[in-house]
Image (cartoon, rainbow, N blue to C red):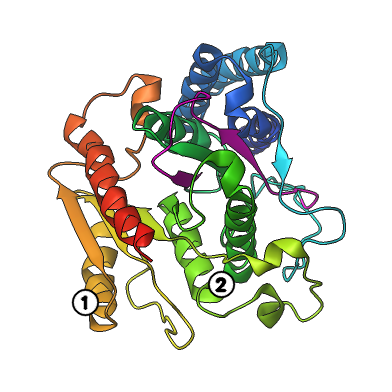
Amino acid sequence: MEDKNSNNMLKKAVAEERLKAVPFFEDAPCYPVKELVRMWRLGRQLEAETDNKTCMAQLQEFCMLRDSLQKKENAPQRIYLWSDGRMPVMTEYEDNSDCRYNHNPDFRPYLYEMLLPEGKEPKGAVVVCAGGDHGDCVLSEGYQTCLDFNEMGYHSFLLLNRTNRRPWTGQECGADVARAIRMIRASAGRYGIRENQVAFAGFSNGGLTGEACIRYYSGTQRTADHFPDYREDELDRYYGAPDAFLCIYGPRYKGAAFDYTNVVYPPVFFAVGREDSALDNLNAVLPDLLAHGVETEVHTFAGVPHGQGGITIVGEKTYPNFQLWLQLADVFLQDVFQRQRQK
């Protein structure tokens, strides 16, 4: 019994300390990458460690590193999506004392601008949303992917939204995506892009988040349709759904219902590893999308498991073939945006 209690106490301590580290990963543009990678590796070791003594030593090292992190000089600022009292809310969420989620009830969604150097003409804009409950996934799927799109000539926007099902609804996480897209469209002139050149790239749960935005905020749908008490502002006159959707190993779950009644589904690009269980979901959703006339491009990658987006930032190079999705997505986006220019 004593051993069991000790194990539970240690697990609780690990969960509490890792929760404190979440903002550092989610604010990845602000901190030295080398230190974040080191903390990412320590966190993954803590997940896998079964020996209590070793785990305690690792936890101490993890905490010391986390508490020593200092923001870079000229670190970017968070851009909050909603001013106080304006965020549309549906979920009753008041307690996270068990560290079940990576975000406490007072979490406010925000984004970071990761823009091209001044004077370089952008190909368009990409909003990037990591998977899971965000946290350390943001380092690879979020931050590194933003850098990759910068390298290919796009303005990137790292989105930290209320995470889908953890514990928030599709309407809530979708509203955050729509708000971010509207903010970008409203500043299209400043960014040097057209209003109809905004894509969304979502990984795993971030892919489900992207489809939630399309489901609830495309076509003529408005935020007030889903949140009757919501008060519109000047941003709500801009279209909230993306012009193109990059769904990276995050297709809708097999058997999940989707109501297309008011939906205008944008061209969608899928990239999934063949050793990823998400492939079963893709095989189920693809015929449904095609039956509803959705323009779809699909790429699968031999031998690749789940969660490989941006993983090169932590030194993982086991599946170099998966990195091809980036160049394929670039061609896809340029084709979509070229046709958008003719509208």
| Quarter of the view holding residue 263 | bottom left
Question: Would residue 62 be found to the left or right of residue 95 on screen?
Answer: left
Disc 2 residue type (three-letter)? Tyr
Q: Position of residue 40 (x, y in %)?
A: 50, 24
Disc 1 residue type (three-letter)? Pro
Mark 2 lies on a secondary structure that is helix
Q: Mark 2 and mark 1: span between their CA atoms?
A: 23 Å
Residue 109 counted in the magenta span: yes
| Quarter of the view holding residue 19 | top right
Range of residues picked out in magenta: 105-129
Q: Is residue 325 above or below residue 319?
A: below
Q: Quadrant of the C terminus?
A: bottom left
Residue 45 counted in the magenta span: no
Residue 217: numbered disc:
2
The answer to whether any part of residue 250 appears in the image is no
Q: Position of residue 101 (x, y in %)?
A: 64, 49
- Foreground tag (2 vs 1): 2
In percent of the image, x 36 and y 55: which residue is there? 247
Residue designated by label 1: 287
